[in-house]
Amino acid sequence: MQMSASEELEQMAVRFANEAIQFDRQGSKSNAISRYERTVEILLKLCALYPEAPQNKLYMQQIENCKQRIRLLKEQNGRFEESDHTPRQPARLEQLVLTEKPNVKWNEIADLRDAKKAIEESIVFPVKRPDLFPLGWPRGILFFGPPGCGKTLLAAAIATEIYAVFYSVDAASIMSKWLGESEKNVAELFSSARQAAEVGKPVIIFIDEVDSLVGIRGDEVGGEVRTRNQFLKEMDNVLDKKRQTHVYVIGATNKPWALDEPFIRRFQKRIYVPLPTAESRQELYEIYAKNLKLASDVDRTLLVEKTEGYSGSDFRDIFQGAQTKVVREFFEGNHSKTQGQARAIAMDDFKDVLRKRKPSVSPQMLTLYDKWFETYKAL
């Protein structure tokens, strides 16, 4: 099948970029500079020929990366030239993932009982007693729902519960960092996870904004296709029932309708993380109130009632806003700035914040989540 002109140009850019990286690592600055400059030239041509192409933002990021590396190499060579030219070295896996052990407890997450139950059945129980699952267990899990409702916290709590190695990945970074390197980043990520699992440790790969990686695309270029295919291949490897290692892929998205059908199927559990209910908001109240000095007139029931439709992060921001209001009053008063204490937060402070802060999720958006959940739910 004959390649299009854009695909040919992209392949040329990838080739020159890879050569530049190789020369750069070998310390051959002049050759690296020439290859980086050639990469910039081709990517600029692509942007000029196809000004409406959705991948132009990615190209411009790579152009800026190349220009920055050119400047640095010329400076190191003692022949720095003033120009608007701007790369960083290609980002490696360790720059794209967080592998620190999280420390989030189940009781720090308000309510979400259905989500917690599904997680226990899919991850916690199989880790503790794999012998009870002769047909295998789900290893691909999708958290979807409005932003600020605890999807990332849930993933971190799972890792804490089963003492897992935790890889936290920003899908947008994987896709946008270095032209031609994205699929290598995906392969390296899963390879590292498998190595950790082979010594008996459960591993969680948490991919935030997973729609950036596996979303529906109208026009895809070669690099995007290869990255998506690599991710598909790695997911199939993880889901292989013959493998008894505990590697789990947890994806989170605020836009589940943007996911491509083949990838939806590979997330065997699809868990809706909704806006907090009244019961959840009462739990959130207890979590945030314990660290604050509240006046006796603060009415928890009224505050829970007035925050209907607010996300978990909205609720936290309301408490933070009330605290900030009191602190500002303290500093603007005639008090010593290094002594004394701010007054207790009153109910009027919360009411004032609520007048100025509306929910971050619209009713129309909630309707889309409910519709998608009814179509694809898999708890």
Image (cartoon, helix red, strand yellow):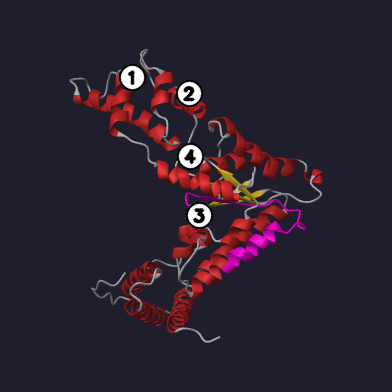
Question: Which one is closest to the eye, mark 2 or mark 3?
Answer: 3
Q: Which amino acid type is marked by label 4?
A: Cys
Q: Position of residue 126 (x, y in %)?
A: 73, 44
Q: Are marks 4 and 3 in contact (CB under 8 Å)?
A: no
Residue 68 lies left or right of residue 178; in this view the side is: left
Q: Label 2, on which residue?
A: 286
Whichever of callouts 4 and 1 sits on the residue coming sooner in the sequence is 4
Residue tagged 3: 257
Q: What is the count of numbered marks?
A: 4
- Which mark, by number, is residue 327? none
What residue is disc 4 on?
149
Question: Which marked residue is nearer to the observer: mark 2 or mark 1?
Answer: 1
Are the residues flagged by discs 2 and 1 in contact, CB closer than 8 Å?
no
Nearest the viewer among 38 and 216 is 216
- Which quadrant holds the N terminus? bottom right
Single out the mark in the foreground, 4 or 2: 4
Q: Amino acid at mark 1?
A: Met
The magenta segment: 229-255
What residue is at 56 percent from the left and 40 percent from the top? 154
Q: Which residue is mark 1?
A: 347
The quarter of the rendered structure image containing the C terminus is top right
Q: How far apart are the alpha carbons under marks 4 and 1?
A: 24 Å
Helix, strand or loop under label 4: loop
Viewer-side residue, 252 vs 107: 252
Determine the CA span between mark 4 and mark 3. 18 Å
Please say if 228 is above or below 352.
Answer: below
